[in-house]
Amino acid sequence: MFAPIIKKLRTIQQNGLTTSVIQLGRKAPAAELERVQNAIRQELEWMSGFEPYNNNEDIDRAVADGELVPVTEDDNLRPVMRYRNPELIRDYPPYLRQKPYQLLQIIGQRWRDLMRERGLSEDIKLAVSMLTCTKEYQQKLIQGGKLAVDKGPHSCGFAFDIDGCGYYLGDTPINPRPDKQSAYTQAFASAGSRVVPFGSYEQYDRQVHLLLDQVLDSLASEGLIHFILEYPDSNNSSYHICTNPETP
């Protein structure tokens, strides 16, 4: 009797949270949107043989079938808080297809090897900022003026993003967005979640992402991925990485 009502209330809560978070993000300038749309044409060709996950029910089926696998924290990578909170799993499903999941692990390990060669801290982890999303969520991004396209690789389970100007130092996020701290805290608090206080950006070491550049350039030259740095030279820069589904 109460199940439909509870489900409806949950949907309203989801829409409220995701919409609020989308509004907090940067709106894409026309030039940047055009640049990214042109840059990902190869990715859209790769996705032509795949159907997007339209909604959470599609994702549930893909998880049950083993098509999508969970992305969790390891020694090299840490999904941002929204993907680590089981209460938000319907809002931010923490999954990838098998092949991109494996490539994410490869990226993390190759990056860590370079970090160790330079004697950089083992406490630093790359921040995974976006994983698979539904077509419904992708449409919200488009409507919100974000860097998103219809039937993009995120909604097909083949793409993930890594923060391009921030990372984790232990449990602490190190990023240049302290002005967003309060707003994000309020948005997630409304959903019963929390935002870990950001650390001082004076601790940021640019080598972390210069080494990631090397890893991504190498994998792209091998034909395994396509990637683009979104919003370069800004406090919103992000590596968008798409797996080539045509490779073994």
Image: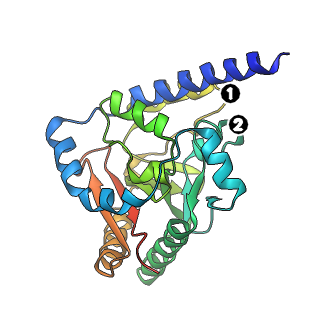
Q: CA distance from mark 2 to mark 1?
A: 8 Å
Q: Which mark is residue 192?
A: 1
2 or 1: tag closer to the N-terminus: 2
Q: Please provide percent x and percent y for residue 188.
A: 58, 29
Marks 2 and 1 close (CB-CB < 8 Å) = yes
Q: Is residue 108 visible?
A: yes
Q: Please provide percent x and percent y for residue 172.
A: 55, 49
Amino acid type shown at disc 1: Gly
Count of number-bearing discs: 2
Question: 128 or 132, which lies in front?
Answer: 132
The residue under the point 25% across, 47% down is 231
Amino acid type shown at disc 2: Glu
The residue under the point 43% across, 69% down is 245
The residue under the point 32% across, 60% down is 43
* Left or right: 162 in relation to 187: left
Direction front: furthest residue? 49
Q: Secondary structure at mark 1?
A: loop
Q: Is residue 190 visible?
A: no
Label 2 Cα crowd, 10 Å radius (few <14 / some 14-19 / many 20+): few
The residue under the point 38% across, 75% down is 224
Q: Secondary structure at mark 2?
A: helix
Vertical placement of 1 versus 108: above or below?
above
* Left or right: 232 in relation to 53: left
Q: Which residue is mark 2?
A: 87
Vertical placement of 8 versus 88: above or below?
above
Label 1 Cα crowd, 10 Å radius (few <14 / some 14-19 / many 20+): few
Question: Where on the picture, by quarter, is residue 17?
Answer: top right
